[in-house]
């Protein structure tokens, strides 16, 4: 009887771990940041000679 309980418990743990893994993978795909190339934005930086220590974007 103990062996059967342990087997059932083990099967349940395996099933539960699989459900949690699927849920976490689904959450990860929802919250995964877009790749760097998708969010790249071009900016222009100009330095004025009058205030050379300041950078204006």
Image (cartoon, rainbow, N blue to C red):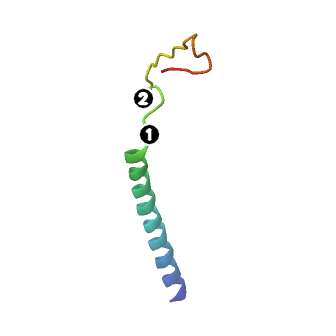
Where residue 5 appears, as percent x and y from the top left, is 49, 84
Quarter of the image where one finds residue 22: bottom left
Location of residue 16 with respect to 48 vertically, above or below: below
Going 41% across and 62% down the picture, which residue do you hit?
19
Q: Residues within 10 Å of mark 2 (few under 14, many from 20)?
A: few
Residue at image coords 52%, 81%: 6
| Residue that extends furthest to the bottom in the rendered view of this protein | 1
Q: Is residue 41 above or below residue 19?
A: above
- Residue labelled with disc 1: 33
Q: Which residue occupies 51% across, 14% down?
A: 46
Of all residues, the one furthest to the front in this rendering is 50
Please, what secondary structure does the residue beneath circle 1 have? loop
Q: Earlier in the sequence, mark 2 or mark 1?
A: 1
* CA distance separating discs 2 and 1: 9 Å
For label 2, the SS is loop
Q: Nearer the viewer, residue 20 or 39?
A: 39
Vertical placement of 9 versus 1: above or below? above
Q: Nearer the viewer, residue 33 or 44?
A: 44
- Name the residue at 50% across, 20% down: 56
**Callout 1: 10 Å neighbours few (<14), some, many (20+)?**
few
Q: Are marks 2 and 1 in contact (CB under 8 Å)?
A: yes
Q: Is residue 47 left or right of residue 40?
A: right
Residue lying at the far right of the rendered structure: 53
For the residue pair 45 and 41, the one nearer the viewer reads as 45
| Residue labelled with disc 2 | 39
Image quadrant assignment for residue 38: top left
């Amino acid at each position: 009887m103990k062996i059967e309980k342990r087997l059932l418990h083990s099967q349940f743990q395996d099933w539960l771990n699989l459900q949690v893994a699927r849920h976490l993978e689904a959450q990860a795909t929802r919250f995964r940041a877009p790749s760097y190339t998708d969010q790249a934005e071009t900016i222009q930086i100009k330095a004025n000679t009058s205030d050379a220590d300041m950078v204006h974007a």
